[in-house]
Amino acid sequence: MRNIVYLSLPKAKLSFVWSYSMKTLLFTFLFVLSGLTLLKAQPGWPPAFVITSDTVAYYRLDSTYFQILPDKTAQLTIEQVTSPAYAQTFQFSQRGDGTFGTVETYWYRFRLKNGLDHDVTLYFGNQLDYFELFTQDASGTWQRQRTGRRLPFNERDGLKASQAVPVMLRAGQEVVIFERWKDPAISYHFWDYVPTFTFEHRLWNTVYVDRLEKNREQTILLQAIFWGITLIMALYNLCIFLVVRERVYLYYTFFLLFFGFSRMPASVRPYLFPDFSDAIYYSQLAAYILTDLCLIQFIRSFLQTAARLPKRDTWLVRTAILWAVFRPVELYFTLNAFPSNETELALTVFFSATAYLIFIVLYVLIILVLVQAARRKYQGAKLLAGSIIPLFLLMILGRMLFYLLGGGTGGADSPYEKLLDNQYYTTEIIEGLATVWLVFLFSGALSQRYNQMRREVAEQALERERLEKEREIERNQLMEAQKAELERQVAERTAEVVAQKEEIEAQRDSLAKTLRDLQNTQTQLIHKEKMASLGELTAGIAHEIQNPLNFVNNFAESSVDLLEELQQGPIQTVEDPDKKEEAEELLEDLQQNLQRICHHGQRAGSIVKGMLEHSRAGAGEKTPTDLNLLAEEYLRLAYQNLRLKDESFEADLRLELDHGLEKVPVVAQEMGRVLLNLYNNAFYAVQEKARSQASDGSGVGFQPQVAVSTHIREGKVELRVKDNGTGIPEEILGKIYQPFFTTKPTGQGNTGLGLSLSYDIVTKGHGGDMQVETEEGQYTEMIVQIPVN
């Protein structure tokens, strides 16, 4: 059985059930008796309407089968209208009863009897603002069902979207029904409103209602997809407007927003707004007006009708203004200001007819503008016409088919009932698809316009660039002509000057080159002379110092020996103990002073020796040398020398030598001196760290370590000497290569020339480089780089 209903047809619900069993016979008798008593107490009831057929589309009760009670206060209840006091107030429907335009609430009463041999389900509802239906159950209690356009969706009974309530009648059953109607429209011509009902299996347009009542989620989903597409297109065109600042995109954005809101169907709004207020309904009607106005502005701006089609544009603007004025007035009269007399009713009809006539004229003008623009081949005109005209034609064709097939009379009596059932729902699908078609073609037209605008902008830029180049060419040609004239005048005068200039420049270049060579040679000679003079001066000073220094050292040593003989000989013969003790103390002090003189004389001698060695640096001859062997040999030598001085010293020696290293041209003696200095410094650092940690008790587990490695890096031999000793403080790191600078205490046999001499040997004698990496208290790593060639 199809569960479909047209929005103007009623639905019903079971009121009470007759029982034919023997167990309830007495109760049935008493109930019938009470019903007869009620009828007797309410004289003047209309006769019961007997249902003899269930094949008709619907029943509209004749005025002889129902009575009406105007409820001027709109406060009467079912208990009051069924009481004897109101029994005589129900009257048969007739015109001119004095309630025209003053009463909005009416009570209807009538009786129905099922004259068929089977049960039937009836549906009631007259598409009013508020509709209530009352029937009695088996206990005599009145049961109420409510529905209506303005009743919140969640409070409706029966088929909510269709606004219909059901009543079921058993075979042969008779039922008393009261209906309460509330709607301002009833007050104008209530005599045209009669109780109407239909059968469940005769509900027309079954396909539509099945989808409406059973597949509401799918309907909402389809509408959501449509609104989503509309919103996305609106945002997209709004972004384009913000970029290009053309009003046509802004008009189209507002058109999409108002159009999407206006297309919200009444069957979907209750699901989105369960409390469905008048504001939403009126705002949707306002959206229709704004949609049309935005559409007109969009078309005018897109096609530039004010400049291209001035006459059509003038009529279009005037008609749009009339539409914007008459449509709100028409809505006011038809929806808010219900007329109270025939004059106001005539005004309502006038404004409604005028508004619809203006609406038709407006869209006819739109179509004419689009057709004329398409004929003149204006850009995008065909797309606009191809999107709007099919939509209008499909809407008109759908409405025509609806009425031609009998949709205006209920549909169930139409011989095309099945076709109408599908056509009604299909019309909405076709209109929806046509709407999407309109949105996409409009968007395509705007996209085409945007691309054309970009091309025009690019062409304009190219044109400006072309004109600028042409002007530049003209200026260049003029300048070239003037230049040629000037060159012609001065060419002969400048030819000789140019030749002389070239000759002078050639001589100047030759002299400059000679001068540079002389300067380089002079610099080298001066450097060599300075170095030679410095070496000779250093050697002379060292020799001059060496002679008196030798006398000092020799006489100091002889004096020490004489003091020892004096202390062991003549002093022992002194008999006075005090004088003897005093003489011994003086001799001991004198002996210590002579020892200090001898010690510092020896230190001065080592300094002089270092100066002599420094002055002789670079004097040797380079020969191919195995640096691995040289590094290992001097490492062992330095370690053994230190062990001879301090037998308790031990260190971990690590060699990481590149055995693929070829022989390198160096002065072996000088390079050995460099290695010996680096090794001695490394051993001294780890020895001092070991002594320092041993003295404060933190040296447990410390193992002195000296590592030597060789590698080939970027055409240079790299030799690294790394120790885990005391490191070098950052504040003295820049002084370590200065002559006579040392951090060792006096008496450690250091002259401060070791690193200075080594640095000169590596950098000046071998063209290499010496670097240092250190962290105070952790390690020091000396890096020597010597070119292979």
Image (spheres, rainbow, N blue to C red):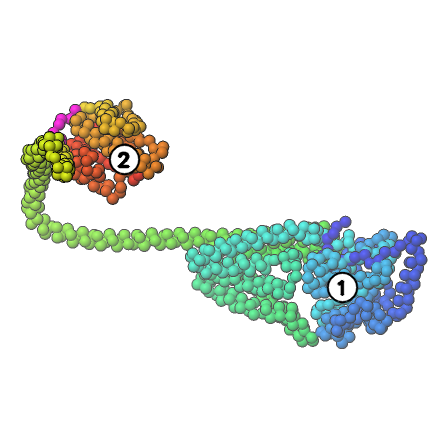
555 or 114, which is in the foreground? 555
Tell me if mark 2 has few (under 14), some (14-19) or many (20+) residues whose alpha carbon lies within 10 angstroms of its own: some
Residue at the spot of label 2: 688
Name the side, left or right, on which 40 lies relative to 355: right
Q: Main secondary structure of the magenta part?
A: loop
What kind of residue is marked 2?
Glu
| Magenta-highlighted residues | 614-623
Q: Is residue 557 visible?
A: no
Say if the magenta span includes residue 619: yes
* Residue 733 spot, x, y in % from top left: 24, 41
Quadrant for the C terminus in the image: top left
- Compared with 3, 131 (above or below) is below
Q: Which residue is mark 1?
A: 132
Could you say where residue 191 lies in the image, as x and y percent from the top left?
76, 69
Above or below: residue 469 compared with residue 727:
below
Q: Quadrant of residue 595?
A: top left
